[in-house]
Amino acid sequence: MKTGLAYTRLLVKDWKASFLFYKDVMEFDVAVEDEEDGYAEFKAGDMRLSIFRRQEMAQLIHNADKPPHAECQDTVALIFTVHDVEEEYQQLRHKGVKFIAPPMNNPYFGIKTAYLRDPDGTLIGLYQLLV
C-alpha cells in the first residue's frame, strides 16, 4: 500500500465543544473549520488531527441505526510528545482541564506521562522522554 499524508480523525458527539477544546485549550492551529458539515482539521506537531461529527460519519457508512456507544475500556488514545509534561500539566490545569492521571515517571519505558480526556471522552496522553 502506498499512502500519502495521514491523519487521525476523531468521531465526536459534540462538535463545538471538541473544536473549542483542541483550538483553545490544546492550542492546535486550525487548518480547516466547517461547523456546518461538522468537520475540522488541526495541525498537531507533525500530524493532522481531524474531528468529524459522529452522526454524519454513521450516516455515510450506513450504520446510524446502531447504538452510539457501549460501556467499555478505552479503545483509542491520542499520544502527544511534549517538551515538559509538568509545564503542560500546569498550563492545562490553569485552563480548567481535569487530569485522570497526573504526571508520573515510568522508568521502565524512560518516559514521564500524564493523561486527560477531551470533551467527548477521548483519552489523551502527554509524554516526554526522560534523559
Image: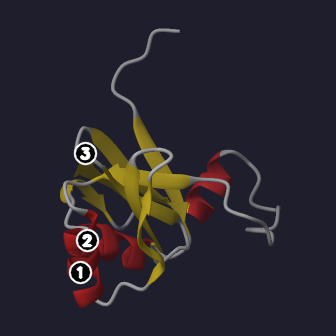
x 40%, y 46%: residue: 110
Q: Amino acid at mark 2?
A: Glu
Q: Is residue 32 left or right of residue 106?
A: left
Place of residue 48 in the rendered image (x, y in percent of width and height, measured from the top left): 31, 43
Query: Label 2: few (<14), some or many (≥20) within 10 Å?
Result: some
Of 103 and 22, which appears nearest the observer? 103
Place of residue 36 in the rendered image (x, y in percent of width and height, measured from the top left): 37, 66
Q: CA distance from mark 1 to mark 3?
A: 21 Å
Of 97 and 90, which appears nearest the observer? 90
Provide the residue designation for mark 1. 90
Q: Is residue 114 left or right of residue 89?
A: right
Place of residue 104 in the rendered image (x, y in percent of width and height, measured from the top left): 42, 67
Q: Are marks 2 and 1 in contact (CB under 8 Å)?
A: yes
Provide the residue designation for mark 2. 86
Place of residue 14 in the rendered image (x, y in percent of width and height, measured from the top left): 49, 76
Q: CA distance from mark 2 to mark 3?
A: 15 Å
Provide the residue designation for mark 3. 131
Q: Earlier in the sequence, mark 1 or mark 3?
A: 1
